[in-house]
Image (tube, rainbow, N blue to C red):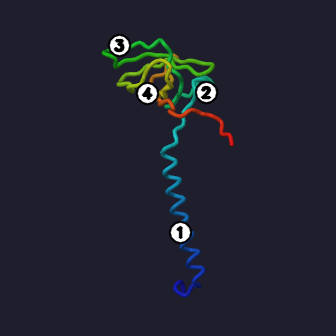
Amino acid sequence: MILGMLPGVKWALLGAVVAACVAYLVYSASGGSSEYYLTVSELRAHANSGDVRVAGVVQNDVQRSEGGLQVLFTEKDGTASIPVEYHGTLPDIFQPGITVVAEGRLGTDGVFHASAVLAKCPSRFSTTPYTQ
């Protein structure tokens, strides 16, 4: 019965299968590249007890110990700040004034205990309005 289908139905079925495959590939490729994080203000407002990512600007109070592998710094957004403690190797561009995304947990002591710190690279392109 399937072999006796009209040629238009066969092409439509083939097109639907190809479209579904392409849609799946686009969905799976974009899902892995999108990263979600909270701002410092959002973290303070929700006080989530699970693992989260929080983004903010590194302040000038960076303290290093244990040969630079233990770091304590403050991360700040427009209205709130939070102390961050991290044990491990930092990104090469880590310094006050850059935006970092710290992954970890907010402790009961009010310190964000990070298991990873990622630096957000500054854009090489300026944002200028498009004019014709």
The residue that label 4 is drawn on is 117
Q: Earlier in the sequence, mark 4 or mark 2?
A: 2
Q: Residues within 10 Å of mark 1 (few under 14, many from 20)?
A: few
Could you tell me the amino acid type at mark 4?
Val
The residue that label 1 is drawn on is 17
The residue that label 2 is drawn on is 42
Could you tell me the amino acid type at mark 2?
Glu
Q: Residues within 10 Å of mark 4 (few under 14, many from 20)?
A: many
Q: Earlier in the sequence, mark 1 or mark 3?
A: 1
Mark 3 element type: strand
Residue at the (49%, 57%) spot, across then down: 25
Q: Which quadrant is home to the C terminus?
A: top right
Is 78 in front, or is 46? 78
Disc marking residue 121 = none
Q: CA distance from mark 2 to mark 1?
A: 42 Å
Q: Earlier in the sequence, mark 4 or mark 3?
A: 3
Q: Are marks 2 and 1 in contact (CB under 8 Å)?
A: no
The number of numbered badges drawn on the structure is 4
Q: Residues within 10 Å of mark 3 (few under 14, many from 20)?
A: few
Q: Are marks 4 and 3 in contact (CB under 8 Å)?
A: no
Image coords of residue 7 (percent x, y): 57, 83
Q: Is residue 125 left or right of residue 79?
A: left
Image coords of residue 113 (percent x, y): 45, 22
Disc marking residue 65 = 3
Residue at the (53%, 83%) spot, across then down: 2
When the figure is inspected, residue 128 is found, relative to residue 18, above or below; the finding is above
Could you tell me the amino acid type at mark 1?
Val
Q: Are marks 1 and 3 in contact (CB under 8 Å)?
A: no
Q: CA distance from mark 4 to mark 1?
A: 42 Å
Q: CA distance from mark 1 to mark 3?
A: 58 Å
Q: CA distance from mark 4 to mark 2?
A: 18 Å
